Image (cartoon, rainbow, N blue to C red):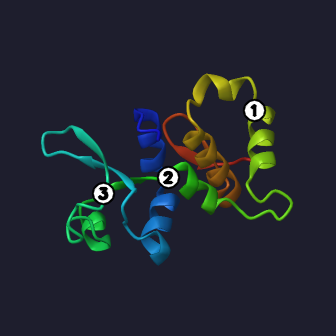
């Protein structure tokens, strides 16, 4: 699971992904979810929700109120990919995405979570990552 500063920033700036988590009951806060939280001293904590945490500590309302940033795992990201009956696991889509962007993608992407997030943001929301923020894709 990618918990790098870059992936955290990508997730934090991906407002559509955060909204997706909040708006879909199937993605309610549950064990296995990763979140980033700012500390009162200005630091950050990355944690994984576990079975032993009290349900009230990280229920849906609390994680929204606490302004936690959801860090989706690979399996959660794959579920958000646009469906393709000819490529049910997204393997062709992922390979094509990476190969079309070589060698530049190799210099800036360091995990499968980052690759999958790039695909989702581009396909679903027509945005590309510019290192600091997501911007509208210019198709011209």
Q: Do the CB atoms of the residues marked 1 and 2 lie less than 8 Å apart?
A: no
Checking the image for residue 14, the label placed there is 2
Q: Mark 3 or 1, which is nearer the eye?
A: 3
State whether residue 57 is above or below residue 121: below
**How many neighbours does mark 1 have within 10 angstroms: few (below 14), some (14-19), or many (20 or more)?**
few
State whether residue 33 is above or below residue 93: below
Which residue is farthest front? 52
Q: Do the CB atoms of the residues marked 2 and 3 lie less than 8 Å apart?
A: no
Closest to the observer: 17 or 77? Answer: 77
Q: Do the CB atoms of the residues marked 3 and 1 lie less than 8 Å apart?
A: no
Q: Mark 1 vs mark 2: which is more N-terminal?
A: 2
Q: Which residue is depicted at the point 55% across and 43% down? A: 113
Q: CA distance from mark 3 to mark 1?
A: 37 Å
- Element type at marker 1? loop
Q: Which residue is depicted at the point 24% across and 68% down? A: 62
Q: Mark 2 or 3, which is nearer the eye?
A: 3
Q: In this figure, which residue is indicated by the disc labeled 3?
A: 50
Closest to the observer: 95 or 67? Answer: 95
Q: Is residue 11 left or right of residue 105?
A: left
Q: CA distance from mark 1 to mark 2?
A: 21 Å
Q: Is residue 49 left or right of residue 43?
A: right
Closest to the observer: 107 or 135? Answer: 107
Picture coordinates of residue 118, whole percent (x, y) = 62, 45
Picture coordinates of residue 44, whole percent (x, y) = 25, 40
**How many neighbours does mark 2 have within 10 angstroms: few (below 14), some (14-19), or many (20 or more)?**
many
Q: In this figure, which residue is indicated by the disc labeled 1?
A: 101
């Amino acid at each position: 699971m990618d918990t790098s500063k870059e992936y955290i920033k990508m997730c934090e700036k991906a407002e559509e992904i955060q909204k997706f988590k909040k708006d879909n009951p199937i993605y309610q806060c549950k064990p296995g979810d990763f979140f980033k939280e700012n500390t009162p001293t200005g630091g950050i904590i990355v944690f994984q929700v576990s079975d032993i945490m009290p349900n009230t500590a990280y229920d849906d309302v609390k994680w929204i109120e606490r302004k936690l940033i959801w860090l989706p795992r690979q399996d959660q990201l794959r579920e958000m990919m646009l469906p393709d009956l000819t490529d049910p696991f997204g393997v062709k889509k992922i390979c094509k995405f990476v190969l079309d962007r070589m060698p530049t993608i190799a210099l800036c992407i360091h995990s499968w979570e980052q690759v999958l997030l790039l695909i989702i943001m581009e396909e679903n929301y027509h945005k590309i990552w510019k290192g600091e923020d997501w911007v509208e894709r210019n198709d011209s």
